[in-house]
């Protein structure tokens, strides 16, 4: 049924509400937006997935890792749910989804900015950032000669 409607305009699709009523996200995207829309939809889904994985690996603590894993698992659940429902156009689902996604991405940006600031401010020896508790010395400086005059 969806394929017949899609074949009328396979590249561009039939437009929003241009096809028959379907309660499944993926055939609906194909029918309404065509091949180009499906490619854009898949690119968006892939970007969300990749950002979640990147956020997990860059998370500075277990709390942020937990939030990122929770979002990723919820996202995977929505992908499965979209097989039999119009998941990505239901407002009650998408409002909290995009709010949560925005909060995670903003926290990733803040963590990157903080890490970049620490790299600029914190001294390094041989490419390793010194902890704040270790007094900084010039590379090659020996403390045994500090008192000799």
Image: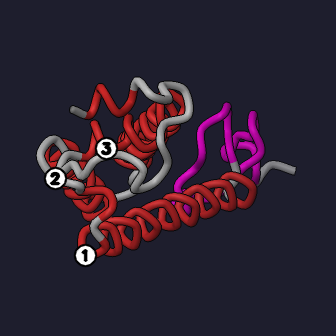
Q: Position of residue 94 (x, y in %)?
A: 32, 67
Quadrant assignment, res 104 = bottom left
Quadrant assignment, res 147 = bottom right
Which element carries disc 2, helix, strand or loop?
loop
Q: Residues within 10 Å of mark 3 (few under 14, many from 20)?
A: many
What residue is shown with label 1? 92
Which element carries disc 3, helix, strand or loop?
helix
Say whether residue 83 is magenta. no
* Residues at marks 3 and 2, CA–CA distance in whole angstroms: 10 Å
Q: Is residue 97 above or below residue 145?
A: below
Check contact, mark 1 vs mark 2: CB within 8 A: no
**Foreground of the two, 91 or 44:** 91
Q: Residues within 10 Å of mark 2 (few under 14, many from 20)?
A: some
What is the number of the mark on residue 50?
A: none
Task: Compare marks 3 and 2 and give the one earlier in the sequence.
Answer: 3
Task: Compare marks 3 and 1 and give the one earlier in the sequence.
Answer: 3
Residue at 39% across / 56% down in the picture? 17
Region of the chain picked out in magenta, as a range? 124-146
Task: Compare marks 1 and 2 and give the one earlier in the sequence.
Answer: 2
Question: Where the N terminus falls, by quadrant?
Answer: top left
């Amino acid at each position: 049924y969806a394929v017949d409607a899609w074949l009328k305009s396979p590249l561009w699709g039939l437009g929003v509400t241009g096809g028959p009523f379907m309660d499944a996200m993926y055939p609906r995207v194909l029918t309404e937006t065509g091949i180009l829309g499906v490619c854009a939809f898949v690119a968006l889904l892939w970007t969300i997935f990749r950002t979640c994985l990147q956020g997990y690996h860059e998370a500075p603590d277990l709390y942020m890792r937990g939030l990122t894993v929770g979002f990723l698992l919820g996202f995977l659940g929505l992908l499965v749910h979209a097989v039999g429902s119009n998941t990505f156009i239901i407002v009650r689902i998408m409002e909290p989804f995009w709010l949560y996604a925005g909060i995670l991405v903003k926290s990733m940006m803040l963590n990157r900015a903080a890490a970049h600031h620490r790299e600029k401010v914190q001294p390094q020896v041989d490419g390793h950032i010194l902890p704040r508790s270790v007094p900084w010395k010039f590379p090659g400086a020996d403390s045994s000669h500090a008192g000799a005059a």
